[in-house]
Image: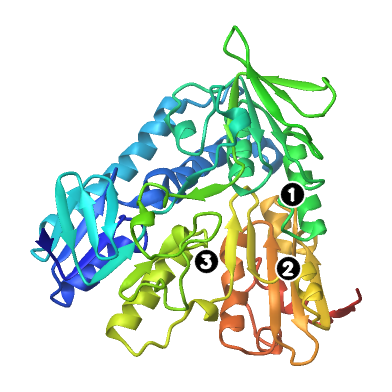
């Protein structure tokens, strides 16, 4: 048995910075990764998908340049193999930098292989048995694949990134973040795209007005939407195309050349053999943790997607910050202190912070709402990108912002200015009364906040 001060399982956005922090403190660390260094974000998540979004945007620019007085000869075309090559080069460069930093650190020992627990503080990887008083689980999550699709040739957010030829017709099951991002980018690349969603709106966790606006954006680009789908199932045809059933009766059917599943995520905890430990999980397989990411077993922590406290790179990194502060700081950082924020990286993007309107009302808040259409913003009109809106929900009792959304050009970046005010526990008047440079999209935030209106149940 090999003795270490700490074992870190998984090299995602929490595990990787943590091993370097532990090493800096003089801890001898066993670092275990079953596949590729860097975790989901670097290898199959944010980095590759946003690289594809950038390429898709270039196609959109080429197709819409004439609206801004620029004539581009017809025939712009996507070379998916080159798009993939650019993505691979970016990922490989980042991964090589991380691997070099690990190799140069004498306190970190890297093990490639799948980890499993022998007991609370004993971990097996390949033929090695490791033990440590501190263990950190950062195994992430993967695409959820329901049984009704397991007999057909389906794509996930990972495998679709390995395609080198464009799908003729991409059928997407799931009208939320993953499905919509891939749906729009492949539509812009030149594929026919159909998005199928069980709910009566896309991204149903959002307020209805946001969902409707996103539906308008998708349909304006030629994406076919099928909502209220039921009895969903898929069959693979003799010519390797896929037919998807969208209603309980036999018809209508949707036939496509490729099927992408964007239904949800499931934690990668099922291979850890947690049944050999006292570590508790919930019914969905997420590891239960306290405000400091520590499990019910003292000294064992779960960070990132596998603890069910966030499904984003930024929440995973914040988990690292919380644990690092717990171990080596003043233990002032907690999961419960963070304000939820995320983006839907379609184009134009959605930036979200805090509660939606329906969440605030459901929690009994007396609220005010401020809203501004992007079509009223000079810079948006100048850029020729006027779809969407910005809005904020305000607690009428203390004037603090409970939540905000910016769906429109720059929305993924602009939302941070509102989030900063929320994190500072300042009233909305702090940003309302600020002077913002012109001409920008952000300058309409103070204008939006001038006269918030009461919202009734």
Question: Can see residue 182?
Answer: yes
Q: Tell which tag, 3 or 2, sits nearer the viewer.
A: 3
CB within 8 Å, label 3 to label 2: no
Provide the residue designation for mark 1: 214
Q: CA distance from mark 1 to mark 2?
A: 15 Å
**Which residue lies at the image location 73% right of the left edge and 40% below the top edge?**
197
Which of the two residues, 386 or 113, is positioned nearer the viewer here?
Answer: 113
Question: Can see residue 97?
Answer: no
Sooner in the amino-acid sequence: mark 3 or mark 2: 3
**Which residue lies at the image location 56% right of the left edge and 64% below the top edge?**
413
In the figure, 55 relative to 252: above or below? Answer: below
Q: Which quarter of the picture shows residue 343?
A: bottom right
Provide the residue designation for mark 3: 309
Image coordinates for residue 316, horizontal then vertical, percent = 43, 64
Q: Tell which tag, 1 or 2, sits nearer the viewer.
A: 2
Number of callouts: 3
Image coordinates for residue 376, horizontal then vertical, percent = 80, 63
Other residues around mark 3 within 10 Å, as few (<14) / some (14–19) / many (≥20):
many
Outermost top residue: 238
Mark carried by residue 356: 2
């Amino acid at each position: 048995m090999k003795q270490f001060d700490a074992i870190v399982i998984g090299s995602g956005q929490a595990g990787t910075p943590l091993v370097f922090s532990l090493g800096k403190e003089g801890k001898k660390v066993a670092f275990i990764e079953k596949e590729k260094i860097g975790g989901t974000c670097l290898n199959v998540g944010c980095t590759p998908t946003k690289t594809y979004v950038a390429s898709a945007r270039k196609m959109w620019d080429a197709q819409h340049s004439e609206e801004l007085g620029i004539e581009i000869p017809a025939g712009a075309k996507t070379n998916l193999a080159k798009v993939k090559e650019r993505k691979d080069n970016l990922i490989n460069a980042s991964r090589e930098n991380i691997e070099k930093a690990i190799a140069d650190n004498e306190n970190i020992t890297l093990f490639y292989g799948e980890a499993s627990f022998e007991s609370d503080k004993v971990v097996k990887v390949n033929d090695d048995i490791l033990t440590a008083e501190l263990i950190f689980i950062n195994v992430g999550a993967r695409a959820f694949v329901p049984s009704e699709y397991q007999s057909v040739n389906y794509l996930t957010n990972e495998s679709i990134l390995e395609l080198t030829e464009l799908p003729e017709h991409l059928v997407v099951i799931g009208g939320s973040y993953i499905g919509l991002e891939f749906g729009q980018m492949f539509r812009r690349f030149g594929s026919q795209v159909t998005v199928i969603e069980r709910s009566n709106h896309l991204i149903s966790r959002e307020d209805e007005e946001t969902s409707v606006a996103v539906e308008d954006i998708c349909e304006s680009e030629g994406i076919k939407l099928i909502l209220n789908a039921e009895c969903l199932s898929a069959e693979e045809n003799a010519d390797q195309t896929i037919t998807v059933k969208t209603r309980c009766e036999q018809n209508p059917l949707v036939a496509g050349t490729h099927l992408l599943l964007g239904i949800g995520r499931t934690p990668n905890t099922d291979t850890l053999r947690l049944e050999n430990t006292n570590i508790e999980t919930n019914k969905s397989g997420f590891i239960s943790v306290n405000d400091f990411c520590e499990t019910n077993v003292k000294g064992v922590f779960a960070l990132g997607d596998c603890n069910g406290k966030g499904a984003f790179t930024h929440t995973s990194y914040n988990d690292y910050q919380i644990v690092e502060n717990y171990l080596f700081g003043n233990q002032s950082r907690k999961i419960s202190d963070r304000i939820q924020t995320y983006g839907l990286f379609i184009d134009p993007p959605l930036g979200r912070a805090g509660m939606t309107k329906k969440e605030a009302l459901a929690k009994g808040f007396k609220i005010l709402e401020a809203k501004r259409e992007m079509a009223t913003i000079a810079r948006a009109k100048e850029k020729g990108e006027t779809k969407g809106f910005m809005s904020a929900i305000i607690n009428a009792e203390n004037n603090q912002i409970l939540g905000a959304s910016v769906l429109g050009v720059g929305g993924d970046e602009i939302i941070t200015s509102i989030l900063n005010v929320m994190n500072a526990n300042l009233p909305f008047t702090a940003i309302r009364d600020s002077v913002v440079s012109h001409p920008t999209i952000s300058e309409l935030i103070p204008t939006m906040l001038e006269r918030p209106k009461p919202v009734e149940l």
